[in-house]
Amino acid sequence: MLFPSEVFLFVFLPIVVTVYYAFLRKTTVAKNLFLLAASLFFYAWGEPVYVFLMIGTIIFNWIFGILVDKFRNNKIIVKLVFVLMILVNLGILGWFKYAGFTVLQINRFLHTAINVPVVALPIGISFFTFQAMSYVIDVYRERGKVQYNLFYVGLYVSLFPQLIAGPIVRYETIADQIENRKENFSDFSAGVTRFCIGLGKKVLVANNMAVIADNAFALIINGEFQASMGMAWLGAIAYTLQIFFDFSGYSDMAIGLGQMFGFRFEENFNYPYISKSVSEFWRRWHISLGSWFRDYVYIPLGGSRVSKPRLIFNTFVVWLLTGIWHGANWTFIAWGLMYFVIITVEKLTGLDKKDKWWGHIYTMVLVIIGWVIFKSTGLGTAVLYIKAMFGIGAKGLIDKAVFAYIAQNWIYFVLAIVGCAPLMPYIDKKMNKDKDGAAAMVWNIFYAIAIIICLVVSVSFISNNAYNPFIYFNF
């Protein structure tokens, strides 16, 4: 079930909100059980079989959490439990996400003929697997009490706002909120506003950028890019905007929905395209994934307070795993290793600490090239596309299609450019400096009207069956 869909907006969400607040608001246990049931139904709507896989993941990690807490003073048993926990979780993730790819590579390099397993990828498996592992690790670190109530562990892992495309919510973040959260009208209205903004980012900007990006990347035919250098750049820029507004829009909707039910999730994006170094970009992009690898992989390996060779090794492991996490394709591995090289160079040269205007330019060029690799179906296709961006193999400098796409979509490009910078928060802060002043009143009325228009227009696009993919459902 997609957030930007009629069944979610007009059936599922209204029913859940009505039951939650009209009948269950004063009883935490009942609220949690209802949200768990609603979340399982939400997932089963799109994955009627794999919902049982998620339930199994919940049960396994609930047991692991209890064992870790019970035997935390016995290092041998705790290590065995941790090893088993990792093997079970990564084994399930590995089978569904990487089994076919792994067998293909074995056949390719060893010239074998092993049957390639055809395994359907459960939606959001990477996200709920990492959350389940976070529960066990945080219990061991005493950053959240162990849950003997299986249903509460189930609620943490399956909570529908962030279930299938993040953000990855750490157990320590909401351990107390599960039992002690307090809902109020202010938070609910703020959550609705955040959801509407995310819906607009996704439906109005990301979806329209997706059409341009998909058409541009489809121009590689028979090993050649069948358009101009300008078209190659337009497609790459469109995808750069698409993936940001697609994923950050989903995160906004997830955070807003969580706030509507009293949960406070941490931010997942902080205007990454204003960064002046690649290292800064990754502190601002997909923050929940970056912090997960930092706290559960990078720091346990020794972090940055180690020798340079060890620092390089630690960085390599994190970025290799980041690439692998995103999918079973050499393009994701190459994409992750590209960032390993760039960030290592920045750390060793101090380039990441230089706050210069040209840092933004080189960062965005590298990020755009990275997204080309990320989107491409194979490394060969990525190389062909990147070469076309620099005039090698392209059909001229620019063509009429570039101007046509810009003329047809200029308003979405304007919205995208404005949305990539913290302009609106800056204006909001300035206008609300005097909360009781006339300027603040006029601004807040204008803001409310803009949110309503955003919602109405977004719903109209959804009702017209506009192009509506979700990139991170694949992960």
Image (spheres, rainbow, N blue to C red):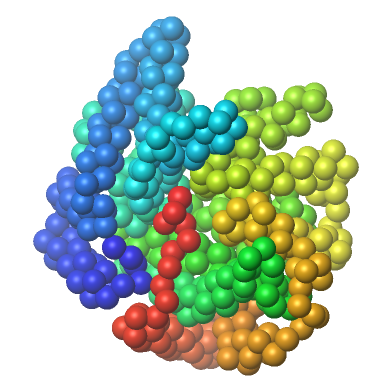
Residue 179, given in percent of the width and then of the height, sits at 27, 43
Please tell me in which quadrant of the rendered image residue 466 appears: bottom left
Q: Quadrant of the N terminus?
A: bottom left
Image height of 405 relative to 137, above or below: below
Image height of 301 relative to 474, above or below: above
Q: Using the image as rendered, state which of residue 263 and residue 133 is in the foreground.
A: 133
Is residue 432 shown left or right of residue 312? left
Count the marks: how many?
0
Q: Using the image as rendered, state which of residue 267 and residue 231 is in the foreground.
A: 231
Residue 121, given in percent of the width and then of the height, sits at 37, 47
Is residue 129 shown left or right of residue 342? left
Which residue appears at 56% of the width and 75% of the height?
215
Q: Using the image as rendered, state which of residue 51 and residue 170 is in the foreground.
A: 51
Residue 214, given in percent of the width and then of the height, sits at 55, 71
Which residue appears at 69% of the width and 42% of the height?
337
Which residue appears at 18% of the width and 60% of the height?
20
Which residue appears at 21% of the width and 67% of the height?
12
Is residue 120 shown left or right of residue 320? left
Specify whether residue 315 is in view: yes
Please tell me in which quadrant of the rendered image residue 407 appears: bottom right
- The residue at the far left in this view is 23
Specify whether residue 179 is in view: no
Residue 308, given in percent of the width and then of the height, sits at 81, 28
